[in-house]
Image (tube, coloured by chain):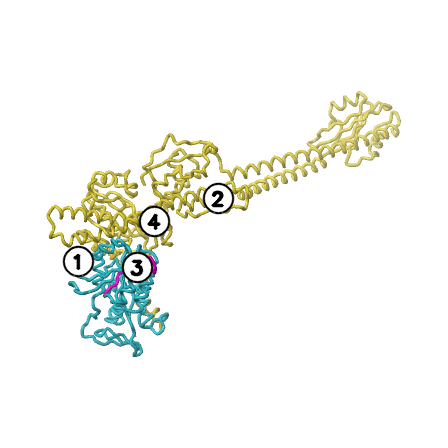
Chain colours: A yellow, B cyan
Amino acid sequence: MPEPSSPNPSAPEGRPVETRPVETRPVETRPVETRPVETRPVDTRPVETQPVETRPVDARSVDGRTAETRTGGSNAGGDTPDARPVRTRTHRRVRARFIAPVRRSIGLRTRLTLTYGLGAALLAAVMSITTFGLTRENLMTQREESAEARAIANAARIASQLPNGAGPAAIEKVLSGLPTPEGAQPVLHYQGQWYATNTIDFGERAIPDSLKATVDGGQPALMRASYLDAPYLVTGVPIPSLAAEYYEGVPLSDLQRTLDGLAISLLGASALTTVAGGLVGFWASRRVFAPLLDVGRAADAIAGGRLDTRLPVGGDPDLDLIAQPFNEMAQALEDRIERDARFASEVSHELRSPLMTLAATVEVLENSADEMPDRARTALVLLSADVDRLQQLVEDLLEISRFDVGAIKLHLEDVLVAEMVIQAVSVLGGGGVPVRYDPDVGDVVVRVDKRRFGRVIANLLDNAERYAGGATALTLELVDDKVQIAVEDRGNGVPEDERDIIFDRFSRGSEGGNRAADSGVGLGLALVDEHVRLHGGRVWVEDRRDGESGARFVVELPVVEPAKEESSAARSDEGGAS
Amino acid sequence: MGRAMGTRILTVEDDERIRTAVKMALEDEGWVVEEADTGEDALQAFTRNPADVVLIDIMLPGIDGFEVCRSIRRASDVPIVMVTARADTHDVVAGLEAGADDYLTKPFAPKELSARIRALLRRARTADPTVTHLRFGDLEIIPDEGVVLRDGKEVHLTKTEFRLLVELASSPGRVFSREVLLERVWGYGYFGDGRLVDVHVRRLRMKVEADPANPRHVVTVRGLGYKLQQ
């Protein structure tokens, strides 16, 4: 699909909200007054004006729109014949106002989830570190105090039990006789010799030099050290009476294990808290977002033509801040569109009575045209032609205003598409336009309002007549599960950039404009578009496939399952009747 | 078909200009046109001197076109053409159910109106002129006399209903599509309004069927049309 719009560099992007209260003048942002039926999705327009927009969300929505335009017509009116058409074609008149600058960032929901998750993680970390620190401090202090007390007691015991000048055997005996809970290892430095009960696990070498120096200086001291990769708490107590120093090493590995266990538990708890925080964030964001999604859905519904869509008000005072202005906007839009549509409809209705009189009197005059002077007869021919034209215009206007107020009721029937097209051409006098189709199209059934679809064919042929010297062929072909009805002509074709706008109301393209004296009223193709859309199909114009100059208008309709075969249907009916 | 001299047409229309213009156009066809600008006037005029065709605008001050249609229909089987504002509203079906034989939407070309009137004035006849008496169970059709009997008692059909029945009876058991019936009974082509057929079949069943909800004679063949059977 061509993109006729050009980015508007002066689009007033980045206005703060306060400068334009949206709810007071919603129509400002869209030219509804000129094209009342256009319930185009608002978000297609920002994208058109902002080609730099690269947010994935928006990009997706653009894709979605495009896909809908191309294939999704069927849900516009296929099942519900009185549904209003969804206008999805891109348009050239582009004017949009942004009330806030576009922020390029990750999605709001992701952000909220992450914020909650990070908050929970931070909180958990602080709590864990504090808990760990306090516990460690507490346990350590306890351990140190008991170790110190015991070491001092043991030192006193040595001082009292060890006779001066005792030999190594006596020293060993005293040392091994000391009470050593918690696996404490006694070490004695006496007369330059080191004595220990178990020099493999803990001996002189396990005692840090700085501690030795301190205790040598007559000061009891306590130090954490590690020996053979195991942590120890080493307490040194000088024994002045023996000129000896007593050391005691308490293994801290159990404490370390406890603390490790605690750390792991805290870490796990923190991780859980973080995840829980994230989940809460996710849940909360969904809760917070749900009303926003409702707004989006409502806006979509309005864009899709259901102008009476409103948001519920009164449930939540905070959400009402969004819902109320939204509803006011929707109401203003609906009122405006209805007013315009009603106006067009009323004008057309009012025109019908005088037209009726005109048509009848012109006919009366024509009945006696033979008795008129030449000048009067010429004038009558002009009058008659323009009465016809006026009548057509009023009929078209009425029909299109019915689209606008959504008052179209299709009278759907299952018909053989080929037969219908042939009949439509023959009703119009044909003009020798050949209808060509493959044998497999012969029994293809479509569900249409015959009267309206006859007008579609008539308008396409009429269009070819006016602007391209007449249609050269009408072809039907089956493409996937759709049938394409194509009207070809031998005109100049339709330039790429006009292929969309020629389906707009009162737009005749450059070709049409050149024939100002012609009698076209410029609603024919717009009606074709509306009718086809209402039938769940789509219409477009392309170049002729054989490479020759000329346009090819294609109407694509969904194919329905053919009606039940005669015999079974008849039998079931009889069965029901007897 | 030629001009049916002396045919009288009653036009009920409140807009004087339209009434006059249509009257002139119809007079050019050789018909005698009587005018009425309200429903009450129309009923009085019809009672005084029944017309051969009645043309009623639905939008009338006072009693509306539907009521006028129903009142006339109670007393007569005269062909009635309704003039409606729109073809796709309920108006059309309501008008047909009130007893109208055909309808036109405003603005219409008087030539179209003349064609409608001529189609309604055409005499009913079967495809085979030798067929003079048809019997379908409890139903008897005597095309020549324009009489239909059910259980031996005469059933009052409008001209259009009668022609529809005779058309179906011309080939018993054959399925007639709406398009074919529209063409043969009303003179419409392929793009005629199928609701004309549907509503008239409904009206016909009310009169010729013992149980209109379970028709035995005028049977619907889903997706295809209607047929007449024993």
Report which quarter residue A131 is drawn in: top right
Query: Which class describes the residues within 10 Å of circle 1: few (<14), some (14-19), or many (20+)?
Result: some
Evaluate if marks 3 and 4 touch, with contact meaning CB atoms under 8 Å apart: no
Instruction: Indicate yes or no whether the magenta region holds residue B63.
Output: yes
Under mark 4, the amino acid is Phe
Q: Residue beneath label 1, please? A: B28
Residue A481 location, x and y as percent?
32, 53
Viewer-closest of A461 and A313: A313
The picture quadrant where one finds residue A197 is top right
Q: Nearer the viewer, mark 2 or mark 4?
A: 4
Give the residue at mark 4.
Answer: A403
Q: Chain of mark 1?
A: B
The residue that disc 3 covers is B38
Mark 2 → mark 4, Cα distance in angstroms: 29 Å
Task: Give me the residue at 41% from left, 48% from top.
Answer: A306
In the rendered image, residues at marks 3 and 2 fall on the same chain: no
Q: Which is nearer the eye, B173 or B50?
A: B50
Question: CA gap, disc 3 to disc 4?
Answer: 33 Å
